[in-house]
Amino acid sequence: MEKVPMTVRGEKLLRDELERLLKLRPQITQAIAEARELGDLKENAEYHAAREEQGICEAQIRDIEYKLSVAQVIDVTKMENSGKVIFGSTVTLIDVDTEEEKRYQIVGDDEAEIKAGRISVSSPIARGLIGKCEGDEVSISTPGGEKLFEIDQVEYL
């Protein structure tokens, strides 16, 4: 089984969600029991809704448990800051053409959220940055065409 990289933050979020779902389980079971007492199950909307909610909850629990079982948690705060872009590092880029500054943290696929500045390790930008160092210029193919960036700073937060 191939391990999937994940940040410490990503693992914590998954564990918190798993804990929430596990606490929800008995409540759903109780709702099913109460709906069962209402009578005919064929036409019992409460029963069917509770059963559907139970199915969704169980699927989410299985999904999270699987993700945690294949996760390779990487704590970049314990890495020596060599100025090299690695998984989990936060990179400040300067667009060479516009002087616009962008800041991204390279995270696992499930953790990616571009609006929050977290990009997937498998994204074109991250693949272009991995292994490069502070001060390097990097040409990255974007939907808008080739862009030239300078790596201004690499942090292991």
Image (cartoon, rainbow, N blue to C red):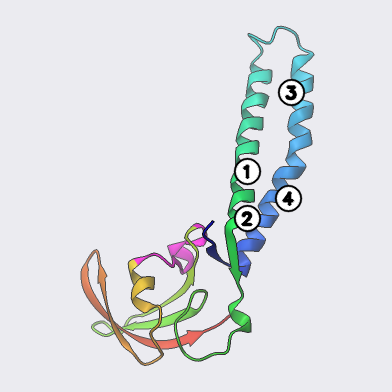
Residue 105 x, y percent position in the rendering: 48, 73
Q: Earlier in the sequence, mark 1 or mark 3?
A: 3
Q: Earlier in the sequence, mark 4 or mark 2?
A: 4
Please, is residue 16 above or below residue 136 in the view?
A: above
Which residue occupies the foreground of this view, 57 or 45? 57
Q: Which mark is residue 69?
A: 2
Q: What residue is disc 3 on?
A: 32
The residue type indicated by label 4 comes to Glu
Q: Between marks 3 and 2, how big is the CA–CA gap?
A: 30 Å
Q: What residue is disc 1 on?
A: 62
Q: What residue is disc 4 on?
A: 19
Please, is residue 40 above or below residue 119 in the view?
A: above
Range shown magenta: 110-123
Camera-side mark, 1 or 3: 1
Camera-side mark, 3 or 2: 2
Please, is residue 50 above or below residue 77 in the view?
A: above
Q: Are marks 2 and 1 in contact (CB under 8 Å)?
A: no
Residue in the picture at 47% in, 62% down: 112
